[in-house]
Amino acid sequence: MHIPVRICYTKAIAAMIWAAWEKGGKDLSLWHNFWGHLGTVSHHRALVFVHCCRAGIPWQGLWHDFSKFSPVEFWAGVRYYQGDHSPNEEERRHNGYSAAWLHHKGRNRHHLEYWIDYSAGGPEPLAGVRMPPRFVAEMICDRIAASKTYRGSDYTDRDPWDYYERSKGHYMLHPETRAQMEKAFILLRDEGEDALFQYVRSELLHK
Ligand SMILES: [Zn+2]
């Protein structure tokens, strides 16, 4: 069990050295990227943790996105660090796909993409499975944190809804999960965070 993990780290370090070499000696930017990416991940996890505490799921908040510290996700984050948008997009542009994202969404149950499966007799070959409520709650906490980071001082309670509305056309979601998500973001938009977390705790999680 230990050997593959060590090989994985060795490969990651070799990839970093190669990336530095490729950049023609601008290896300082890799150092800058390392701290930049670590800062982004830590800041995001801290924000999600605060939201998860308010939603009544502190343990999930503590472990949220922990796979981002695995070699495949972390070193891609460093190598393709952008500062203003996701390194996954950059990795995708570079390689045609993002290995970091494929690793991430396959292990983190707060992502709707984790719950896509072959449909059991539905009209489409693939379909969104009903997400357990505690992961719907974590997804909501995650999206609010992402909106806050992305919008900075311009953030308002309607931003998570606006983002959802722009993207909902391509989301593969179970109708019940979709309804829960929409209700949460409409509540946040119209009545604020207190009302949202009250809904998550009492109606969604029955706490
Ligand atoms: Zn995640």
Image (spheres, rainbow, N blue to C red):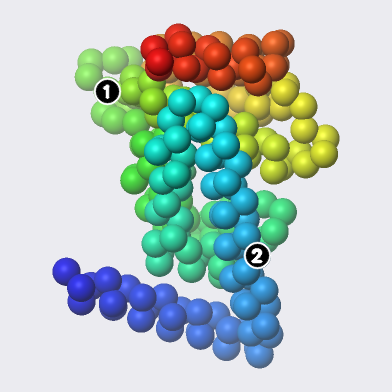
In the figure, is residue 133 to the left or right of 192?
Answer: left
Instruction: Tell me which residue sits at (34%, 31%) in the image.
Output: 115
Residue 186 spot, x, y in % from top left: 64, 13
Instruction: Tell me which residue sits at (63%, 78%) in the image.
Output: 31
Q: Residues within 10 Å of mark 2 (few under 14, many from 20)?
A: some
Q: Which element is circle 1 on?
A: loop
Residue 10 spot, x, y in % from top left: 36, 81
Q: Residues within 10 Å of mark 1 (few under 14, many from 20)?
A: few
Decide which of 103, 197 is in the foreground and name it: 197
Q: Amino acid at mark 1?
A: Ser
Q: Which mark is residue 152?
A: none
Q: Which mark is residue 119?
A: 1
Decide which of 45, 56 is in the foreground and name it: 56
Quarter holding the N terminus is: bottom left
Upstream in sequence: badge 1 or badge 2: 2
Question: What residue is shown with label 2?
Answer: 36
Instruction: Tell me which residue sits at (77%, 41%) in the image.
Output: 152
Q: Quadrant of residue 191?
A: top right
Instruction: Tell me which residue sits at (29%, 30%) in the image.
Output: 117
Decide which of 18, 67 is in the foreground and name it: 67
Q: Amino acid at mark 2?
A: Gly
